[in-house]
Amino acid sequence: MRIWVDGTLRNADDATVSVLDHGLTVGDGVFETLKTVEGAAFATTRHLDRLTRSARGLGLPDPDLDEVRRGCEAVLAANPAPLGRLRITYTGGISPLGSDRGDAGPTLVIALGAASVRPDTTAVVTVPWTRNERGALSGLKTTSYGENVVALARAHAQGASEALFGNTVGRLCEGTGSNVFVVLGGQLLTPPLSSGCLAGITRELVAEWSGAQEADLPLEALDEAEEIFLTSTLRDVQAVRLVDGREVPGAPGPVTAKAMRVFAERAGADLNP
């Protein structure tokens, strides 16, 4: 494996960053994950725009997107894969121990891992922990993923592939690495960004292409929904068949099946929508 580290393509054994990097010591970093198909990344422009927004929200300097693109191209060329997960990580760089950021400049790492085609349906669980819709990191795609690790482990222990969060006021928010859509009364709905959820790229495209509307939903909407599906970079659109062990009949339902079909057609026709 060849990995891009601060302007240089390196072998995996030599692709190192300092143990004093702020991304390691305090989670001071942002990232993006892009799906790649036969060496081509999907929705690159949207992902890099969000990388910049997240960096600004964390107070990091804007990433050099020309360098990021060069790094992505180099990594993709060096690591042929039919289906891949391209990870761009951008951190506060070498810093003092503690929350103060140093002045050495940011760190940029780009790596590619293998990915597999997801099944059409999956199981999810709800977790007792909440997203803080008013927190300093709300809506930012940061490397501070500790609560996601804990929640996803809870999901796996219960035979599910994803954990869903409510926010501090009991509204439906998001998964550990996905956005959630529900069908209520035939309408396709998804929580608004004000809920604290991430502005997912796949979420954005599905809303544009399938006409979903934002709606402030109680967590209990999962009990009432006629259909539920998840969206993310590597899931695309994935129907939910079980919520906390309770069956969602007929998954994928007609609205979900249409969203899956439309996304596959539109994404296949344009790699950078």
Image (cartoon, grey):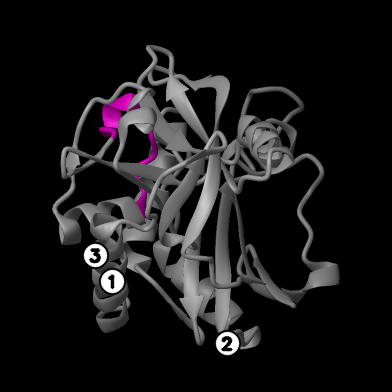
Residue at the image point whose x is 52% and y is 73% from the top: 72
The disc placed on residue 77 is: 2
Q: Are marks 3 and 1 in contact (CB under 8 Å)?
A: yes
Residues in magenta, as a range: 191-201
The Cα–Cα distance between marks 2 and 1, rounded to whole angstroms, is 30 Å
Give the residue drawn at x 31%, y 51%: 203
Amino acid type shown at disc 3: Lys
Q: Residue 261 carries which label?
A: 1
Can residue 67 be seen at all in this image of the molecule?
A: no
Residue 250 lies in the magenta stretch: no
Magenta region, main secondary structure:
loop
**Crowding near pointer 2: few (<14 within 10 Å), some, many (20+)?**
few
On-image quarter of the N terminus: bottom right
Above or below: residue 240 compared with residue 259: above
232 relative position to 150: left or right: left
Q: Residues within 10 Å of mark 1 (few under 14, many from 20)?
A: few
Type of the residue with mark 1: Arg
Position in image of residue 146 (x %, y %): 67, 32
Question: Which residue shows up at 54% across the image and 47% down it?
Answer: 123
Helix, strand or loop under label 1 = helix
